[in-house]
Amino acid sequence: MSGREVELSVHLDGRRDRVRWSLPSGHTASEDDAADAALTATLLVAMARDEALTLEAPISARLDLQVPLIQDIFATWARHSQLMRGLPPGFRRVSVEAGARPAPSHHGRATGVGRSACFFSGGLDSFTSALAHRDEDLTLVYVHGLDVPLHDTARRERFSAVVRHAAATLGLALVEVETDVRAFTDHDVDWLDGHGAALAGIAMLLGSAFSRVYVPATDTYATLVTLGSHPLVDPLWSTERVELVHDGARYTRIDKLRIIDAEPIARETLRVCVRDGIGEFNCGRCWKCVLTMVGVHSLGIADRFSTLPDLGERELLRRVAEPAPDVAVRSWDRHRMLWVPYLAAAEEHLGAASRRRLEAALALRYARSRARTETGKIRQATTRNIGRLRGAHSGTGS
């Protein structure tokens, strides 16, 4: 399981799977690194399936101590998921049999001491972290197989070329990792829950080269929700060899747009879209594209970001008012909080009338979304009741 090609064999309830990581040239993972990565790949899957987890090799003593707390956090979040997301609880605490390795000596981790890495996709969060830490001995890490499927070779090559260009322009080193861990976890775990653990596993496999790895934050400390990458959880994946740092949660997305606006390569290559299979960088219709387009419009800098559609205000507000089917939020109250900095920026840069128009579009969006949600609940309840009536009728023998 060690070396440049790391492969994990998984046996779950009669199902056999393999998870693979391919590291860049010059980077190798030890058996200890691979054992720790095996835990990150399988723990949430086992919790989702409510199955005991047995690992063949012992894991980091530090990580072993944190596993109960990691489970507590995800299980607690899961108990509230029905209210927050309209889904049944997703995770339960399970037995984990692994054993703990003795803590390594200082000399055993000297290679990567002082060197830092940062996960980088070319998005708003990762550009902000890269710029914040560019004066360190920083390396960017781009991962194939997480946001773009491995089989989509054309898009992978296109996005990879852009990331390489961005890293070179910023004067930062870049390593590329390939993995199918998402294809494995997606059977049982929502990617919103599982992406933090997937990144942690990659950080562990690169632990011989880097003693600190930054995980760019999605939310601010004021808008935190139950998300797989979270300031509570990311540090818990740390081992004696590598420290994971949840980075940038003090910045709103408006703050981040202001930061990267000063960097031409970020404006020229920004990719925020969450929609699969699109030919361009940003579709201009998914919730993340709309959020970002409203941000640059409200700041008066829309013409400076070449990868985002530069729409007029009327069309942009129409898209804001659409209840996008792919909106990936877990609480409408939280989503409203996300828009507060945008409203303030619109008023500051465009005037009070612009803020009122944006508020009206948001009010329409929420009204439509609530109506759609209630309609869906009625349909689900109707379907359940019809099933019960049919079962009762069948039981009478009539």
Image: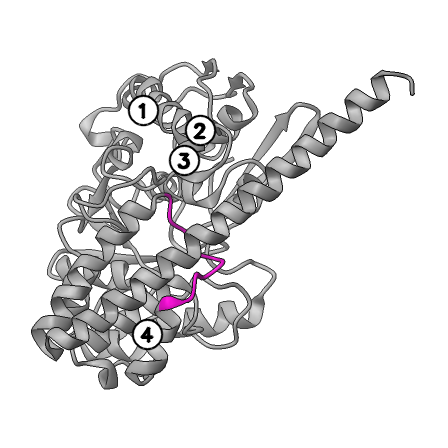
Q: Are marks 4 and 1 in contact (CB under 8 Å)?
A: no
Magenta region: which residues? Answer: 321-330
Q: Secondary structure at mark 2?
A: helix
Q: Are marks 3 and 4 in contact (CB under 8 Å)?
A: no
How many angstroms separate mark 3 from mark 2 (CA)? 15 Å
Residue at image x 29%, y 40%?
225
Depth-wise, is mark 4 or mark 1 nearer the camera?
A: 4
| Drawn side of residue 120 relative to residue 12, left or right | left
Q: Note whether 178 is above or below 93 in the view shown.
A: below
Q: Are marks 2 and 4 in contact (CB under 8 Å)?
A: no
Tell me which label, 3 or 4, sits earlier in the chain. Answer: 3
Amino acid type of the residue that numbered disc 1 sits on in the rendered structure: Leu
Q: Which residue is mark 3?
A: 30
Residue type indicated by callout 4: Leu
Q: Which residue is mark 2?
A: 39
Q: Mark 1 and mark 3 in contact? Answer it, CB < 8 Å.
A: no
User: Which of the 4 image quarters holds residue 175?
Assistant: bottom left
Give percent across and percent down for residue 321. 37, 67
| Label 3: which secondary element | loop
Residue lying farthest right? 398
First reached walking from the N terminus: tag 2 or tag 4: 2
* Residue 256 visible in rendering: no
Q: Which mark is residue 317?
A: 4
Q: CA distance from mark 4 to mark 1?
A: 47 Å
Query: What residue is drawn where x is 36% and y is 41%?
Result: 196
Front label number (3 vs 4): 4
The three-letter amino acid code for the residue at tag 3 is Ser
State the separation of the CA atoms marked 1 and 3.
16 Å
- Mark 2 and mark 1 in contact? Answer it, CB < 8 Å: yes
Mark-to-mark CA distance, 3 and 4:
52 Å
